[in-house]
Image (spheres, grey):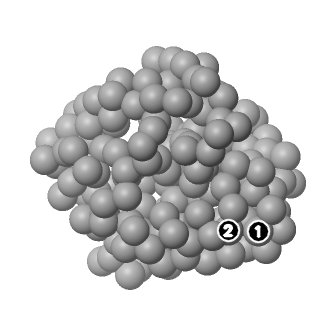
Amino acid sequence: MNDAAPRVLLLPGWLDSDAAHWQSRWEALHGFQRVQQADWHWPRRGDWMAHLEEVLLQEPDARPALLVAHSLGCQLVAAWAAHSQHTARVRGALLVAPPDTERADMPPQLHNWRPMRRQRLPFAATVLYSEDDPYASPACSRGLAADWGAAAHSLGAVGHLNGDSGLGDWPAGVAWLRALDEATR
């Protein structure tokens, strides 16, 4: 990305992204900004939404951001966009491995993320998902993408697309982000 690129905000999911996670690597390699939530263990949807809004409004003259969300961070983007009056601050979103928080086997810490927000996003979005994600079926991932008005792309059987997936610096993910950046200029 070049100097004219928007700022990139990283939105980790439940429990944050560990050092092996591609989001942590991107933060170190590319200088992207991680949105730090107050409570990674008991994530409250309203609190996370309010903090994302706060971060987006911190720099009134900032270029519109690209959001790069993983897991519960994807649900954060959908929930925030459904309620915010400041969605013009976002140019696009790369949504990686959105979880199905309505599943019966979801941990109780995530129950306040029900129901999932399914409104069309007011900005361009791409959903990347795995065929064997333990937190969402491919059908759910494709359904969320359709509801959000996002392009959906299967990356094959790569788990939850997290640190355990062995993606390293994930250059293919950077290519998806660059494509989204170029498509939204």
Q: How far apart are the two marked residues, 1 and 2, measured between alpha carbons?
A: 6 Å
Who is closer to the viewer here, 76 or 65?
A: 76
Q: Is residue 88 above or below residue 18?
A: below
- The three-letter amino acid code for the residue at tag 2 is Pro
* Left or right of residue 33: residue 62: left
- The quadrant of the picture occupied by the C terminus is bottom left
Asked if the residue at tag 2 contacts the one at tag 1, i.e. Cβ–Cβ closer than 8 Å, the answer is yes
Q: Residue at x 45, y 29 (%)?
A: 112
156 sits left or right of 5 in the view: right
Residue shown at the point (40%, 31%) measured from the top left: 45
Q: Residue at x 55, y 30 (%)?
A: 110
- Crowding at dot 1, Cα within 10 Å, few <14 / some 14-19 / many 20+, comes out as some
Q: Amino acid at mark 1?
A: Glu
* Near-viewer residue (15 or 27): 15
User: Which label was assigned to residue 131?
Assistant: 1
Judging depth in this view, the residue of 48 and 91 nearest the camera is 48
**Callout 1 secondary element:** loop
In the picture, measured across the screen, residue 94 lies left or right of residue 15, that is: left
Q: Can residue 7 be seen from the camera position used here?
A: no
Question: How many tags in the picture?
Answer: 2
The x, y position of residue 53, in whole percent, is: 26, 37
